[in-house]
Image (cartoon, rainbow, N blue to C red):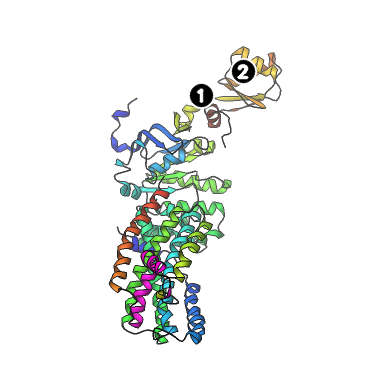
Amino acid sequence: MRNKDVFMKTIKINFIPQLLEPILYLFGIGYGLGFFVREIDGLPYVEFIAPALICISMMNSAFFESTFASFVRMYYQKTFDGIINTPLNIDEVIFGEILWASTKSMINASIILLVVSALQLVRLPESLLLIPLSFLVGLVFASIGMCFTSLVPKIEFFNYPIFLLITPMYLFSGTFFPMSILPEQIQTISLLIFPLAHAVNISRWLTTGIAYSSIALSLLWLVVVAVPLTILSINLMKKRLIV
Amino acid sequence: MKKSLISNMSIAISAEDLTKQFDDFLAVDHINFQINRNEIFGFLGPNGAGKTTTMKMIQCVSPKTSGSLMVNGLDVEKDSRSVKNILGIVPQENNLDPDFSVLKNLLVYARYYNISKEEAERRALEQLDFLQLNEKKDTMIDKLSGGMKRRVILARALINKPRILILDEPTTGLDPQARHMIWDKILSLKKEGVTVVLTTHYMEEASQLCDRLVIMDLGKIIEEGSPQKLIQKHVGSHVVEVDNTPAVMKCLTEDGDKYEEFANRVHVFAAEPEELTSKLMKRCDFDKVTVRQASLEDVFLKLTKKVLRD
């Protein structure tokens, strides 16, 4: 069980474009749209979406790392094949990949948190809890991504989960408007299957003090989902790679 | 056979009834072999014969379907971590990390073996020096030629000071200089006590390097022995090559000579080539006769047929 952290270190870091995106959104939508929307539930619009943007960044960084980036390492660069010739085995390699993707989620969330804190859009010190939360959220999305990585025959196939899962999740998780304005059924589905909805709920509570649904339930949902998903993704990858 | 008298300590790898079944075909079909410590052992065979699959089972990355496979006295399934610790692997496909420089590739790999940073750096520089890659140590992988990449992979495989080195087609696609450099390295590793297992398509490579070898075809081992013994047994000392014409074929069949027929040429196996040549030249219409020493290639072609499989 050693060496996993070592493995993580070996994958280089390049995440500047991913960081710029949420910050652009913050200004573009937060201040732009905020000019018309003014406030939601008593919150200035930009403060309403700031925690959501941090969560979207957690989702994107973890999901893209464990899909495109992991797939490239697995399929094109044969990195995993190389590593499993050493005393490390495939479970450890995949777990390392997932931990790395979660770490990336944490790094990105922390930097954006720094920006929104500087702009005084979040309350402190409560919002600092976003940092551990971002690792948990990262773990959930990294495992989901890794499941897809284990299944897709070609890299182009990642378009399916992105358009069918990530995009609707991005829009309907209480990110840019409260879920309460959505039809009842969609709200239920959202809360049942969208990790982002729970991540946004907890984050918004941390940054503004307003809870849209039970925080304890959201946290429990994330924890309960993270563990089996991680195990499932590792097993699916084993199935793909060990022949 | 005195196999049973050899103590276990002298056996590096042994397989009994080793089998690998993929969904739709049998890649390795109940093979048996023993590789002695400190020898260079070759796996020869056409593409798809099962060589690489066998290597992958030895490397503990592809689970066997049945049979037993022991490496250094350890079971590949139960003790895969210990087995992998003493192996050095040169895979058929280049899998160097393109995100890193040459030196960094070796250092990263060393970390997977829990080798300390200082020690890894010392070993990496030593290997790069030996393989004449010193000037390239800070070069990114995709700037290297094919030969250099193979040498970097060899250097990487040696970073954990393996006792058994597995080379899956180590010199395929290399120029003669690079090939000879790799051969030199393999021979000097043998002197240091390393056991070397290699697969190759190059008969010259197998003849030059291997103490013993097996020839595989369709998942089975069809022959084993030292290169010289196999040549003696199947071909004899010399080969007389002649054009394939009806007159020639008639002559050979009448005399009961041993030969292999190809589309344009016939290879006649002979212990006394002068005698055979003069005898045949007097009696038959032989044109363009070439006499040469028998080689492992003759054995290989004879045993694996000349059918192109892929």
Name the residue located 34 percent from the left edge and 81 percent from the top edge.
A210
Q: Amino acid at mark 2?
A: Leu
What x and y, as percent, mark residue A208?
A: 35, 83
Tell which tag, 2 or 1, sits nearer the viewer.
Answer: 1
Q: Which residue is mark 1?
A: B234
Mark 2 burial class by Cα count in 10 Å: few <14, some 14-19, many 20+: some
- How many residues crowd mark 1 within 10 Å: few (<14), some (14–19), many (20+)? some
Residue B77, above or below A168: above
**Dividing the picture into quarters, in which one does residue B307 lie?**
top right
Q: Main secondary structure of the magenta part?
A: helix
Residue tagged 2: B276
Give the residue furthest to the top. B254
Cα distance in 3D space between marks 2 and 1: 17 Å
Nearer-the-camera pick, B33 or A71:
A71
Chain holding disc 2: B
Residue range of the region highlighted in magenta in the rendering: A181-209
Question: The residue marked by circle 1 belongs to what chain?
Answer: B
